[in-house]
Image (cartoon, rainbow, N blue to C red):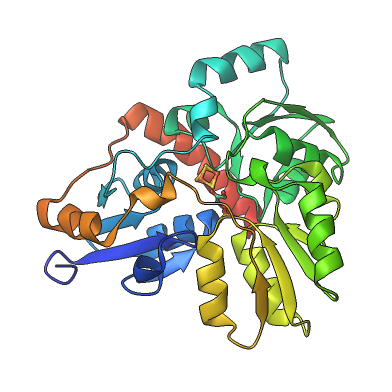
Amino acid sequence: MKKQKNAVILCHNYQRPEILLGIADFAGDSYGLSVEARKTDADVIAFCGVHFMAETAKILNPQKKVLIPSLEAGCSLAESITAKDVRQLKSEHPGVPAVCYVNTSAEVKAECDVCCTSANALKVIEAMPGNEVIFVPDKFMAANLQARAKKKIIAWSGKCIVHDSFSAEQVLEYRHSYPGLKVLAHTECLPEVVSLADMAGGTTDMINYIAASKEKRFLIATECGMSDLLRERFPDKEFITPCSICPYMKKITLENVLEALEKEMFEVKVPENVREKAKKALDRMIEIGK
Ligand code: 13P
Ligand code: SF4
């Protein structure tokens, strides 16, 4: 079906193993997927991830048909903020640049000066003019960035329900039980978890860290799909994975990917006036990330 439709299957690192390891043409983090969406010459992009990611692919590829196999594949962060909320924040802080994490809707991106991902957030924030930035929607990521950033971060109150579930006590217990453990935490985790980690970053940062490390044991504080991917990619290493399932990511199944391709549904659409403004925020991110 993929060949018949000249489709490419883009897949986030958290997807089910049968999708990620079985049918994906490209697996990556949010940033890698946006870049790949830009490069593809396929007519159809079947997006195995959550809605804001498929929307990002559409913003960058208006001429392509972008499909999301389930309309229930949302995100607690993206759903925590609206375009109206961003306008309100900007009016409370006039002239302060607004940075949005990629986990936001197209309407929210359209209200912001620049977008960022976990892999490039600090670089993007530091590239903004002035001593303050508005950062939406993740409050934990904002606090984690604040610990490293030179400027003041004005945060929104969103959180990821998956990364919210890891605790500092849990990390300390695992460290005690597994000597020599390296702790890798996603930057969406609570600051007390990130401060105990050996490395904090996005999903690709985690893969790169493990690939470059001589260590054998890693605790992975992120979504469960990463554990499947890491065990496949690094069979000689040991992964301790308390792991938490993203109910949104797991709405994508092999069956609904096939159905999406067969029926060319559900097509992701973004109104042109919103798309143009959101694209500026993404283009600026890609430019800063180079
Ligand atoms: P990455 O961009 O690090 O892959 O993260 C996306 C995401 O949704 C994390 O929960
Ligand atoms: Fe959203 Fe969290 Fe799921 Fe990522 S893991 S898609 S941030 S709810």
Image-based side of 131 in relation to 248, left or right: right
Q: Is residue 100 above or below residue 82?
A: below
Quarter-wise, where is residue 219 in the image?
bottom right
User: In the rendering, at what x and y percent does residue 113 appear?
Assistant: 60, 32
Residue 41, visible in the rendered structure: no
Say which residue appears at 51% left-offset and 70% top-offset. Answer: 228
* Above or below, comparing residue 261 to residue 211 in the picture: above
Please state the horizontal and vertical placement of residue 231, each as a whole percent of the image.
Answer: 56, 77
Q: How many marks?
A: 0
Position of 24 with respect to 241 (left or right) is: left
Q: Quadrant of residue 74?
A: top left
Question: Can you say which quadrant of the picture contains the C terminus?
Answer: bottom right
Residue at x-position 70% and y-position 49%: 187
Residue 180 image position (x, y, % from top left): 85, 76
Decide which of 31, 204 is in the foreground and name it. 204
Residue placed most toward the observer, 213 or 62: 213
- Position in image of residue 229 (x %, y %): 51, 72
Most extreme residue toward the bottom is: 236
Q: Is residue 177 left or right of residue 5?
A: right
Q: Is residue 74 visible?
A: yes
Which image quarter holds the N terminus? Answer: bottom left
Compared with 29, 133 (above or below) is: above
User: Which of 279 and 256 lies nearest the eye of the viewer?
Assistant: 256
